[in-house]
Amino acid sequence: MRLAFVLPVVVVALATGMFVHGCEGGRGATDHGRGMPGQAAARIERLSVDVIETLPHDPKAFTQGLEMARGMLYESTGVSGRSTVTVGRPGAPPARGAQLPSPLFGEGITVVGPTLWQLTWRNGVAIERDARTLAELRRVPYPEEGWGVCHQPHRGRLVTTDGTSRLVFRDPGTLQKKGEVPVTIRGQRVGRLNELECVGDVVYANVWPTDRIVRIDVDTGEVTGDIAVPPLLSATERRGADVLNGIAAVPGTNQFLLTGKWWPRMFRVAFVPE
């Protein structure tokens, strides 16, 4: 999504602590209640972040999507006229990149075998690219807002977000809808789901415009983990940066890469119990 200051946020007190989220899908602040009386409370693991390594990151990158595949880091950036997609080793300058022509506003990305999908925000299209060269192969209609996307190959589907509390499942070849599930914490919807990362049957989602990540059971839509990301940038760095957005699982480990919009650094982290 866009700059963090363009939309007021609503602070909702949950049993897991103070959970901050914006109003859903631009339709105004919503309160969906706390579930039916007597509803069994799902266990939500409270997690924090253990920083393992700090890496450089392009401070001009308005990060919208981040994903590791075959040892390479793919990144999509936004802002009309400045949107890009790049690939390279984590912490190194990109080996290859492609520019999106104006007025396209780049959003989430995911690698699907030899190709890569890149969503756009409100431009009504998604772009399929060659994952090696990043050359554009085709555009397909995408009438909803594009925010985040990740791939569940064992289920033969993509998982996408549109800035609301929905996870929408799509065919990885056509992007046609195959279903959806609302994301909730003890019966209360969690809005402003943004950049996604699929890890098996679990999806991690940045919650715009906060420093929180939620871990979601995609079968039920229930949040099973609530990750409070501490301040990772210095006060000086924060003045030139925008919100946390960008989460990529490091294959073969329990680690993730985290960064944000216009952040000068990226962090290799593990999620640990508070």
Image: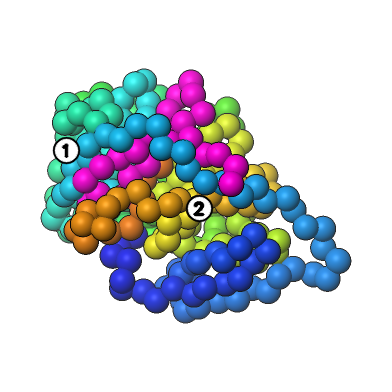
Helix or strand or loop: what does disc 2 sit on?
strand
Residue 73: image x %, image y %? 30, 30
Residues 252 and 138: in front is 252
Residue 145: image x %, image y %? 38, 60
What color scheme is it? rainbow
Total labels: the figure holds 2
Query: Which residue is located at x 73 percent, y 50 percent?
Result: 43
Magenta part mainly helix, strand or loop?
A: strand
Q: Is residue 268 left or right of residue 274?
A: left
Residues 87 and 103: in front is 87
Helix or strand or loop: what does disc 1 sit on?
strand
Query: Which residue is located at x 52 percent, y 39 percent?
Result: 271
The N terminus sits in image quarter: bottom left
Q: Residue 253 in magenta?
A: yes
Q: CA gap, disc 2 to disc 1? A: 33 Å
Q: Earlier in the sequence, mark 2 or mark 1?
A: 1
Magenta part of the chain = 248-274
